[in-house]
Amino acid sequence: MVVLQSCRNLHIGAGKSRDVSEPRGAIVVGASSGIGEALARTLAEEGYRIGLAARRTERLQRIGSELPTQAYVATMDVTDVDDAREGFFQLAEAMPSVDVVVVSAGVGDANHDLEWETERRTIDVNVRGFTAIATAAMEYFERDSDTATDRDGHLVGISSVASRFGNGGTQAYNASKAYVSRYLEGLRDRQTDSDADVTITTIEPGFVDTEMAYGSFWQCSPETAAEQIARAIRKERTHVYVTRRWRLVAWLLHAMPEAVCRRLLS
C-alpha cells in the first residue's frame, strides 16, 4: 500500500483550485537514487514542488527533507502496477499542481545465463511499471490536469542509448529501453489527434555514473545528466541524448550493419 507523506506539512483535503502564480509541481518516479534523485534535486532548485516516489521510504524522506521546496513522499513499487497507479493519483491529488511527471524507475541487471527471475524483474519494472505510470500520467493530464502553466502537462521518460542495439547479457534491459523509446514516440503521435496539450520527452542517456552503469566511456555524473534533462524540460524538447555527444553514437549504431556493431560491442 502507498505511504503518502509530506516533508513540509502536507494537507490533503478539500478541493484544489488552479492558480497560475503557484510554484510548479513535478513528480519523479524512481527518485531514491541515480538520475531520478539528481533530477528531483535539480527541479527543486528551479522552484518546483517535488513528489518523490520509489520503494525506499526512509531514503525518500531524507531526500525530501533536504530539498529547498515542499516535498511529498509516496512509497511505491511499480511492479505492483495497480497499487502504483493508485498511488500516483493519490500523490498527484495531494500536490497543489503537477506540471511534470518523470518516469525514471528502472533496473538493468546483467543476465548472461538467462535466469528467468532476472529477466522477469527487468520486464516488470522497465516495461509494465513504466507503462502503468506513463498511462496514469497521461490520464491525469488529459482528465484532471491541475498545472501552474498554460500546458496540460509534460511527461518525461528515461530510456537509454542502449535502446538502439541488442547486447548479450543485458538483452532484456536493452529491449525494455527500446520499448520505452517507441512507446513515448507513439504517445507523441497520439497527441496529434488529442485535445490535450501534453509535451512528451524521451531522454536517452549514455553512461551515467550510477549503480546501473556498465561502462565509463563518455560517462557523466547524475548531476550533469539532471541539468541537461532539466534544460530539455524547460525547452519542451521531444527527444534528448545525455550527454549530447551520444547523438553521434546513436547515429553510428543506426548506420552500421548489425555484424559490425556486434563486433564493436563485444
Image (spheres, grey):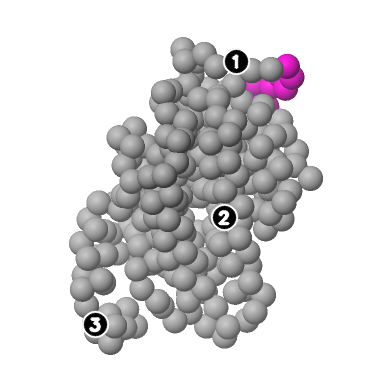
Instruction: Check disc 3 and give the amino acid type.
Output: Pro
- Judged by its main secondary structure, the magenta piece is loop
Residue 15 point in image, percent of width and height:
69, 17
Q: Few, some or many C-alpha atoms within 10 Å of disc 2 (few <14, some 14-19, many ≥20)? A: many
Res 67 seen here: no
Q: Secondary structure at mark 3?
A: loop
Instruction: Check disc 1 and give the amino acid type.
Output: Ser
Q: Which residue is mark 3?
A: 257
- Which residue is drawn at the image coordinates 32% and 50% (left, top)? 239
Is 183 left, or right, of 4 in this rendering?
Answer: left
Residue 39 point in image, percent of width and height:
45, 40
Q: Which residue is mark 1?
A: 17
- 242 shown above or below 3: below
Q: Secondary structure at mark 1?
A: loop
Residue 142 point in image, percent of width and height:
53, 36
Q: Secondary structure at mark 2?
A: helix
Residue 261 point in image, percent of width and height:
27, 80
The magenta segment is: 6-14
Tag 3 near tag 2, CB within 8 Å: no
Q: Viewer-nearest of labels 3 and 2?
A: 2
**Placement of the C terminus among the 4 image quadrants:** bottom left
Res 146 seen here: yes
Q: Is residue 257 or residue 215 the one in the foreground?
A: 257
Q: Which residue is mark 2?
A: 131
